[in-house]
């Protein structure tokens, strides 16, 4: 798929680095074949369901919502962790879930400015209607900037550093895979000095999401996040399996591009969303 990169401001690399990750996190994955959304999971609900997205693909949002709606209406009651809410705003999100009657109110109380919130309205409304906990899963831009500067473990407590082995260098398969995603997602035009920090920030997001998903146990969990985050080889799925006990995890990519490469357990093919050339602004900024 193609992502929409942010124009670089070389005088403010750290704030920019955090912002750029928002565009990159939807990257990854494609499909050799595709099944209807309702058939992607089989009859059994997993303990953890990772549902990806191309952030601006309207069809993908609709298909993912239908998959989730059918499961919930059949009786499933998972917590819903959302990349779209910064984890620092969990208190606001809790307040909104308690006091709001509709999703628009939740968005106004706890949503930020970075997302096309109407695409997420149905999922949020589903959570309100069925009293499903909404859980904030993302780093703030400030935290992401700190990770870019100080490394992956800078945003974690000592126990998490130990659990996820963050005192050691990142596994090469993770670092190399994330670097490829970030470079391709930014039109192979990133300055080399930025790449390592952006990799660290993306990995920190994945580990935080994995940690937050685990914190919901024993409740089942659905994660709503970009395709890059729900990858089982280098994303949240990878980090969930680094801590015991093992969970039953299912990853579904909602993708536009080709060549799945084992990134997801299931894939849903999407028609590419019409959008401007995502590399155009970067070319102007050179």
Image: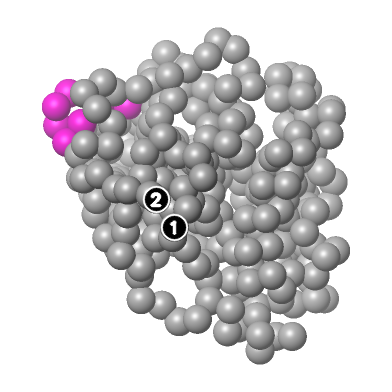
To which residue does mark 2 refer?
Answer: 31
Q: What residue occupies the far front of the structure in this picture?
A: 32
Q: What sort of colour scheme is used for the picture?
A: one colour
The spot of residue 141 in percent (x, y) is 65, 55
Secondary-structure class at tag 2: loop
SS assignment at label 1: loop
Q: Nearer the viewer, residue 104 or 170?
A: 170
Which percent across, then down, holds residue 162? 76, 20
Residue 213, image x, y percentages: 50, 28
Labels 1 and 2 touching (C-beta < 8 A): yes
Q: Which residues are magenta?
A: 69-78
The residue at the point 50 percent across, 67 percent down is 2
Q: Nearer the viewer, residue 150 or 45?
A: 45
- Left or right relative to 190: residue 251: left
Of the pair 224 and 35, the residue shown nearer to us: 35
> Is there any visible trace of residue 240 in the rendered image?
yes
State how many labels appear.
2
Read off the residue under disc 1.
258
Measuring 35% from the left and 22% from the top, which residue is drawn there?
46
Corner quadrant of residue 267? top left
Question: Which quarter of the image is occupied by the C terminus?
Answer: bottom right
Furthest residue in direction top, as rendered = 245
User: Is residue 92 in the magenta section?
Assistant: no
Dot 2: few (<14), some (14–19), or many (≥20) neighbours within 10 Å?
Answer: many
Give me the C-alpha separation between circle 1 and circle 2: 5 Å
Residue 178 in the image: state x and y as whole percent: 67, 49
**Which residue is at the far bottom?**
284
Q: Which residue occupies 24% across, 50% down?
A: 63
Q: Give left or right: position of 102 versus 184.
A: left
For marks 1 and 2 on the same chain, the one whose residue lies earlier in the sequence: 2
């Amino acid at each position: 798929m193609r992502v929409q990169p942010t124009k670089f401001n070389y005088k403010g690399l750290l704030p920019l680095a955090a912002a750029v990750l928002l565009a990159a996190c939807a990257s990854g994955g494609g499909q050799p074949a595709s099944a209807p959304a309702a058939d992607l999971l089989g009859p059994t609900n997993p303990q953890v369901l990772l549902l990806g997205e191309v952030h601006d693909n309207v069809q993908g949002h609709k298909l993912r919502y239908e998959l989730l709606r059918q499961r919930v209406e059949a009786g499933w009651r998972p917590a819903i962790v959302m990349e779209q809410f910064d984890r620092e705003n969990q208190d606001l999100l809790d307040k909104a879930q308690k006091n709001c009657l509709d999703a628009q109110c939740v968005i106004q109380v706890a949503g930020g400015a970075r997302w096309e919130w109407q695409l997420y309205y149905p999922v949020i409304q589903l959570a309100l209607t069925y009293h499903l906990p909404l859980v904030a899963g993302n780093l703030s831009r400030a935290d992401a900037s700190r990770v870019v500067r100080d490394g992956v473990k800078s945003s974690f407590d000592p126990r998490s550093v130990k659990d996820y082995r963050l005192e050691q260098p990142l596994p090469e398969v993770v670092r190399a895979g994330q670097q490829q995603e970030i470079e391709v997602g930014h039109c192979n035009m990133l300055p080399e000095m930025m790449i390592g920090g952006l990799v660290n920030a993306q990995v920190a997001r994945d580990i935080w999401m994995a940690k937050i998903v685990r914190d919901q146990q024993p409740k089942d969990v659905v994660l709503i996040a970009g395709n890059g985050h729900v990858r089982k080889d280098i994303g949240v799925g990878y980090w969930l399996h680094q801590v015991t006990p093992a969970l039953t995890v299912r990853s579904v990519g909602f993708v536009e591009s080709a060549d799945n490469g084992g990134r997801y357990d299931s894939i849903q093919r999407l028609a590419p969303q019409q959008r401007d050339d995502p590399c155009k602004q970067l070319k102007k900024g050179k």
